[in-house]
Image: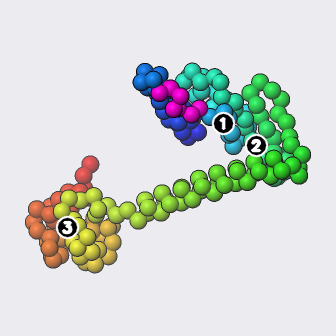
Amino acid sequence: MMKEVLRRRFGRLVKEEEEGALSGKAGDVVRPDLVLIDGGMGQIGAVMEVLADLGVDDIAVVGVAKGPDRDAGLERFFIPGKPYFMLEPKSPVLYYLQRLRDEAHRFAIGTHRARRSAEMKKNPLDEIEGVGPGRKKALLHAFGSARGVSRASVDDLLKVEGVSQPLAERIYGFFRKG
């Protein structure tokens, strides 16, 4: 996942730089000075691979990994080609980087939860042409759930107010495709 995100982000950067060079607006593209990665040498290797594939070799990369037993305050910092180092446990810089990492985690978890929640609320009836909010409500009232609708026969579907023969066949076929 990290490779994919970085490939998209830095691929877009390279493309913008190329387009900027052609249009004379190369100075409008802002290249980051540093990429800070949540993880150790494995994640650093993935980042370096993506950047090398894209020809980006002038951006510093630093990995931040939690220490033994994932204890906060014992983070290790990784820079490609150098031994890892640690900051003083009460260092303001370490505290700032911990807060930065925690905020990134909070954002990622919140985004994941929102996406999962939206997927759970999605109803297969929304995908059927001709089933709007009114018919959807009537079908759910008659059969209790989308699963109940999926088990219904064409004759059962026809008993629902607002469902015509062609629509009943479309609903029936939708749940039995493949």
Query: How is the model colour-coded?
Result: rainbow
> Residue 124's image quarter?
bottom left
Q: Which stretch is magenta? A: 25-31
Label 2 to label 1, Cα distance in Å? Answer: 14 Å
Q: Earlier in the sequence, mark 3 or mark 2?
A: 2
Left or right of 125, for residue 119: right
Label 3 to label 1, Cα distance in Å? Answer: 57 Å
Position in image of residue 18 (x %, y %)? 47, 23
Q: Earlier in the sequence, mark 2 or mark 1?
A: 1
Q: Residue at image x 30%, y 70%?
A: 148
From the viewer's perspective, is residue 71 above or below residue 53? below
State which mark lies toward you, 3 or 2: 2
Position in image of residue 155 (x %, y %)? 14, 70
Q: Name the residue under label 2.
A: 65
Q: Which of marks 3 and 1 is nearer the N terminus?
A: 1
Q: Mark 1 points at which residue?
A: 35
From the viewer's perspective, is residue 133 above or below residue 45? below
